[in-house]
Amino acid sequence: MRRLYRKKALSLVKELDAFPKVPESYVETTASGGTVSLIAFTAMALLAFFEFFVYRDTWMKYEYEVDKDFSSKLRINIDITVAMKCQHVGADILDLAETMITSNGIQYEPVVFELTPEQKLWHRTLLLIQNRLREEHSLQEVLYKSVLKGAPTALPPREVATSEPLGACRIHGHVYVNKVAGNFHITVGKPIHHPRGHAHIAAFVSHDTYNFSHRIDHFSFGEEIPGIINPLDGTEKVTTNNNHMFQYFITVVPTKLHTSKVSADTHQFSVTERERVINHAAGSHGVSGIFMKYDTSSLMVTVSEQHMPLWQFLVRLCGIIGGIFSTTGMIHGFVGFCFDIVCCRFKLGTYKPKEVGLPDAYVRPHADPLLTDNHVQQE
């Protein structure tokens, strides 16, 4: 009984065969069919090869939502070089609530403002990348994918000690502030605290030493991620006027970055620059210095790296192979059909019936005597 059931099951499966086998004796191969098959197999291999690179590639997905985290602190990363001595300048942060943020994490380092040839090359390269980022916004995705591969955007140190006087001050470090609007500024004199706010002791600094030419080697918000270039990185401003005021208006957007290499909470920002000369007689009031006024956005951006799943790659690969195979078969059949019609029309004259003459051997031999007898009787 089991064998009988097996035979019935096998016969049923055979009836459902969608790929019947044709004996080789019934298969006819042609040169045109072989040529088309060669072209089809070549196209399949090329498209499958390119599809594999598409499968390996990734893309960035952007999602937007309301930022509900208002209690956490915002980290500001600073690396700015000012063309004044460190004892003449001071940096601090004042937020919207008139709260002076302690600047214990900020360090003052005497340096030379002029760069070495290696540092100038690095700076020119950074400016070139910044210009390309402003023109091609899609390059930012390349930076997101390549994080932790490139080096940090910090200025490389001097390889050889210099004998030039250290007339500039490098202000670098990080500080944590509240997630409210604030003002980070560098101006003349060291900051001091007092009940009504804050002040800078500038009385003992000569006005002739004022020079707020500066270079921003790095300025960012949130966690530092090597390889990410921020809008102000590489900015350099040089002035010859002692009463110059530089202003940067910054809008900070909280950003969560999730890639195959890193997962971090950072911040993107956009900036608007403005500079002017302080001239009280002309109505241009203010204080000489560098002022960075920032504000946080209420929206948060989540940037995640997406990858094509394996099943989708297999489906696309099957579609490529099946589509090329079916399309080339239909094109070959249609071209062959048209070729046969054209050839048959040109060959119609060769198939017309012709009159066939009989040989002399098949002529009846008594025909001549009959004709001879009739001729005699008439005479």
Image (tube, rainbow, N blue to C red):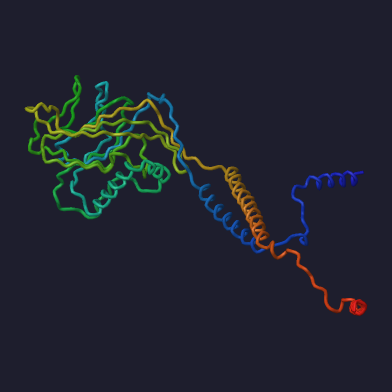
Task: Name the one closer to the observer, 366 or 48.
Answer: 366
x and y, in percent, of residue 104 in the image: 26, 33
Q: Is 177 placed left or right of 241 in the picture?
A: right
User: Relative to 42, is 223 above or below?
Assistant: above
Q: Residue furthest front?
A: 379
x and y percentages locating residue 7 in the rendered image: 87, 47
Relative to 262, 133 lies left or right: left
Image location of residue 112, percent across then percent down? 18, 47
Q: Quadrant of residue 253?
A: top left
Q: Is residue 165 above or below residue 269?
A: below
Position of residue 320 measured from the top left corner of the image (x, y, whole percent): 59, 49
Q: Residue at x 38, y 31 (%)?
A: 254
Closer to the camera in the image, 149 or 274: 274
> Nearest the camera: 42 or 149?
42
- In the image, residue 202 above or below residue 143: above
Q: Residue at x 28, y 29 (%)?
A: 294
Q: Is residue 55 left or right of residue 121?
A: right
Quadrant housing the N terminus? top right
Dividing the picture into quadrants, the one containing residue 372 is: bottom right
Point out the residue furthest to the top here. Answer: 196
- The residue under the point 77% across, 51% down is 20
